[in-house]
Amino acid sequence: MPFRTLSFFSRKIRTTGYLPKEADGIKTKPVLTEDLFLCIEHQTLFGTIVFVSGKVAYFNKTAAALTKLDTDVLSLYKLQDFAVRIHIEDRDRFLKQFDNSEPAEATDDKLTEIRFYDGNGICRYWNVFVNPLYFGGNQGHMLIFTDISSYKETENALKVSEEKYRRLLQTSPDAIVVSDKEGRLLFVSDKTFSLFGYEPDFPYQGIPLYEFVTPEHKNAVKTALQELKKGTGTYKEEYTLLRKDGSVFFAEINSAILNGCNGEANGIISVIRDITQRKIIEKELIRSKNKAEEADRLKTAFLSNMSHEIRTPMNAIVGFAELLTDPDLTEDKKLEYIGIIKSHGDSLLHLIDDILDLAKIEAGQLKIRKVCFSLSEIIREVLMAFQEQLYSLGKTDIELRPKFYPSCPETLLTDPARLRQILNNLLSNAVKFTHQGYIEVGIYTQTISNQEFVVFYVEDSGIGMDSEK
């Protein structure tokens, strides 16, 4: 650490004279040149101790204050006594400076950082400089030192802070980038490389952030950078970004301006979060919501239609039941009315089954019992039942016909009851809205995504259905 106040020592120091010693050997003063002695004596920032023949020959007040040693004790110190108070890891490095026999300048590279345990047992950080002195042919050494403990505390706190933020950058699940105010990259976190698919040695510095954005969003990012430069604080938006391999991913970018000491914008920090999975979930939620709304709409339409479908057979059952109470009815009429009641009763049972099935579907309890059965047989049974219905309704001008394509299998593994139920519903609708022409039940196979499906359809010459239904 440089100290400008050391400048007056930054010249080769060579003194002449001798060191008169007092009888008790305590606090002897060297005869130094007058101007240099005054500088040392009144220096309050730097402690100075002169060692001659390995013993303390002189020290200034600052030295006593920094060492926290009593002046009488310090006066009796030898170099080895002083060295004992130096941290063992720094001791040899400190003593090695006393091997120098040639004066030197107190430049930064000549300063040595040591840890010194003061008179109170507290470890202090010092910067020390040792220069040889000559007194009438005898060599001594001048130790100049200053306490840098406050600086070291600040430095260590800064290192801890830097390490904390470094770990945050390394462990962050998001990419963190710092750019200049024009958006040119200056620094990126480790996560950035993996997110964009680049190697850690990729030369990113100087590349504008918007170069990693898809063309449709590039101008939006440029606009955001301009807004940030105006001092708008933060900016948050979603974009599609480009990886090295050309693939695209959704990202949320949160950016904030970085201000210098003068308060002016000198950079931008951005946090980039991959939200591709979130977008997929959002899309799925929207699809599920639309599906649920469509299902609710269809259920409402179904129940609305059921109210009419139920009322029709119920009215017939009630009406013909009342007619049966007529004592004058012939046996033939009674049998006819009973047949009508039975027919409408069967229709009503089918409607009730449909309503119950709807409830089971909503509850997720509709069970499919798979068995192997003949397709031609089930189609024949369904058509025979509806052929009788056409005759009873007087719709004799309608041709009810099956159509089997060559690829149609002979057997199928599924629930025949559910298949019959579906075909009955489709044929019931066809019979209801067809007055002449034909009703065709067809079967063919279709391959979708390498999987083969059996397709059933009901086609008629009636008025048809709305494509939305």
Image (cartoon, rainbow, N blue to C red):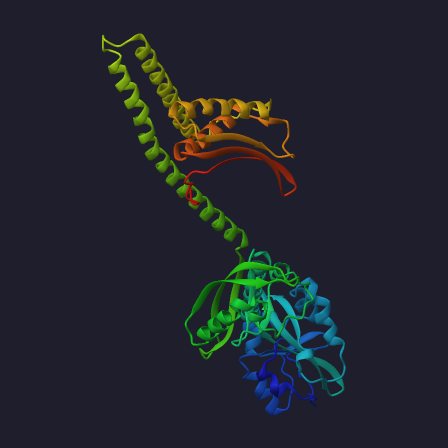
Q: Relative to residue 192, is residue 225 depicted above or below?
A: below
The quadrant of the image that shows the C terminus is top left
Q: Nearer the viewer, residue 469 or 87?
A: 469
Q: Is residue 222 left or right of residue 133?
A: left
**Residue 136 can be seen in this image:** yes
Q: Relative to residue 78, is residue 195 depicted above or below?
A: above
| Image quadrant assignment for residue 433 | top left
Q: Relative to residue 264, is residue 215 depicted above or below?
A: above
Q: Nearer the viewer, residue 340 or 229?
A: 340
* Residue at (43, 38) in percent of width and height: 462
Q: Nearer the viewer, residue 42 or 422?
A: 422
> In the image, residue 341 lies at what x, y percent?
33, 17
**Residue 160 can be seen in this image:** no
| Image quadrant assignment for residue 76 | bottom right
Q: Is residue 297 left or right of residue 279?
A: left
> In the image, residue 57 lies at what x, y percent?
65, 78
Q: Nearer the viewer, residue 284 or 168?
A: 284
> In the image, residue 327 lies at what x, y percent?
23, 8
Q: Is residue 102 left or right of residue 295?
A: right
